[in-house]
Image (cartoon, rainbow, N blue to C red):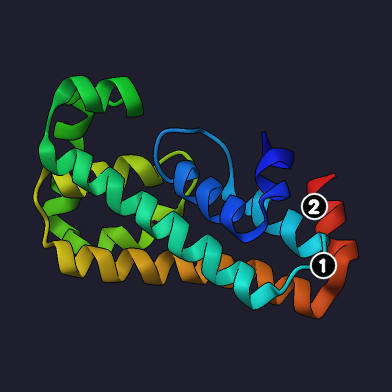
Amino acid sequence: MLELLQDYGFIGLFIGSFLAATVIPFSSDVLLVGMLLAGVDPILSFFSATIGNWLGGLTSYYIGHIGKWDWIEKWFKIKEESMLKQKHWIDKYGSLIAFFSWMPFVGDFLAVGLGFYRVNFTKCAIYMLVGKAVRFAFWVILYHYYGETVLQFKFL
């Protein structure tokens, strides 16, 4: 599937990054690194991955906001008890938690929880965008300064 998305260039990177932030369990980092190793423009790759992953995160927020348990359990495998346990963190840190929605395994859970508890959408969207941009900027900067050898070693 990764090769298929890479064949579509920036649109594939955008779609893959979007899906990775919603219901498909794979890493958009791998897609970005694949694009960088293929020699495509790192700045366009950064924006494509960031915007796609951000919109995917906002979709997860929206699904949480709708609050339909059958959707949340089906697509994100999150149980109601888990959401209730998460509430104290959301009450304490609020929209700042959205910054960490880029994290593997818990990022989707955080985005869904923020939507479910109806944390301020605008603030969540901004923190989420910043967090995801920092994540992808890390890979682009790593590629820029250390080249292909470091990235190939990391992903082979």
Mark 1–mark 2 distance (CA, rounded to whole Å): 17 Å
Q: Residue tagged by mark 1? A: 39
Question: Which comes before the other along the chain, label 1 or label 2?
Answer: 1
Residue 58 vertical position relative to residue 143 in the rendered view, above or below: above
Residue of label 2: 154
Q: Residue at x 69, y 73 (%)?
A: 42
Depth check, mark 1 against mark 2: the one in front is: 1
For label 2, the crowd category at 10 Å Cα-Cα, with few meaning under 14, some 14 to 19 and many 20 or more, is few
**Which quadrant holds residue 102?**
bottom left
**Does 144 sit left or right of 63 as displayed?**
right
* Contact check, label 1 and label 2, Cβ < 8 Å: no
Q: Amino acid at mark 2?
A: Lys
Please say if 75 is above or below 15.
above
Give the image location of residue 60, x and y in percent.
Answer: 29, 44
Quick check: 10 left or right of 81?
Answer: right
Residue at 29% from the left image edge and 59% from the top image edge = 98
The residue depicted at 49 percent of the width and 64 percent of the height is 50
Q: Position of residue 84 (x, y in %)?
A: 14, 33
- Quarter of the image with the N terminus in it: top right
Q: Is residue 62 left or right of residue 132?
A: left
| Location of residue 54 (image quadrant) | bottom left
The secondary element bearing badge 1 is classed as loop
Q: Quadrant of residue 113?
A: top left
